[in-house]
Amino acid sequence: MRTKYFKTILLAIIFITKLSAQSAQDHYIKAKEIYYDVKYDNSFNYKVTTAIEQLTYAIKKDKKFVEAYRFRGQLKNILLDHKGAIKDYSKALELVPNNLEDISARAFAYNFDRQYSKALKDYNKAIELAGENNFALSNLYYSRSLVKFNLKLKSEACEDLSKAGELGNSAAYEMIKKYCH
């Protein structure tokens, strides 16, 4: 009995030591490997959760690891943990303010978490940051229109859809036909 107990303790110590010996980058890479190996089957949630755990280890090792916060936010959105995603994107934005990718991703999470005024504020900022990037702008205007529809701002939403269409987002025209006439 004592031998079995001792072996269990020894294995736990080895596991913890191995875990602490890995760098933040090692955990980040492991999370990417797990995620990109995901198949959409019964193991999907488990693998995404395991990837999130690896990113959490990476963040514990390096509290300023922006890419780990960003990727963990993406994975949390996939699992519909929008509040968790919002926290991760907010932390990434503390570390790298005015990052277009993080602001627009947080806006997406705010929208799905029904925090529409915060989503609108982030989309406004993202549009400002996108500058002359027509691809980004077309998607941002389209996404902002969805928030405006949720806020019952139909005419403003339709204006955003029109801008999105002019910038090359063909889905915007389908939305205009369906909701703006």
Image: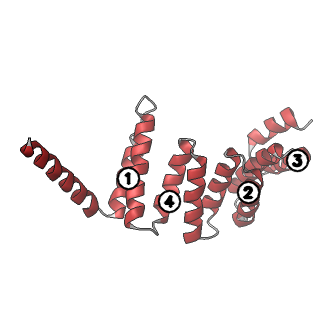
Of residue 136 and residue 55, the one placed in the foreground of this image is 55
Q: Earlier in the sequence, mark 3 or mark 2?
A: 2
Count of numbered circles on the image: 4
**Label annotation for residue 101:** none
Find disc 3 in the rendering and name its residue. Answer: 153
Give the farthest residue toward the top. Answer: 42
Q: Quadrant of residue 149?
A: top right
**Label annotation for residue 54:** 1
Question: The N terminus lies in which quarter of the figure?
Answer: top left
Q: Earlier in the sequence, mark 4 or mark 1?
A: 1
Q: Quadrant of residue 98?
A: bottom right
Q: Which residue shows up at 21% across the image and 51% down it?
A: 12
Q: Which residue shows up at 42% across the image and 55% down it?
A: 55
How far is the residue under mark 4 from the one under mark 1? Answer: 11 Å
* Three-letter amino acid code of the residue under disc 2: Lys
Find disc 4 in the rendering and name its residue. Answer: 69
Q: Earlier in the sequence, mark 1 or mark 2?
A: 1
Q: Within 10 Å of the Cα at label 3, are there few (<14), some (14-19), or many (20+) other Cα atoms?
A: few
* Three-letter amino acid code of the residue under disc 1: Gln
* Three-letter amino acid code of the residue under disc 3: Leu
Q: Earlier in the sequence, mark 1 or mark 3?
A: 1
Quick check: can you spot residue 140? yes
How far is the residue under mark 1 from the one under mark 2? Answer: 29 Å
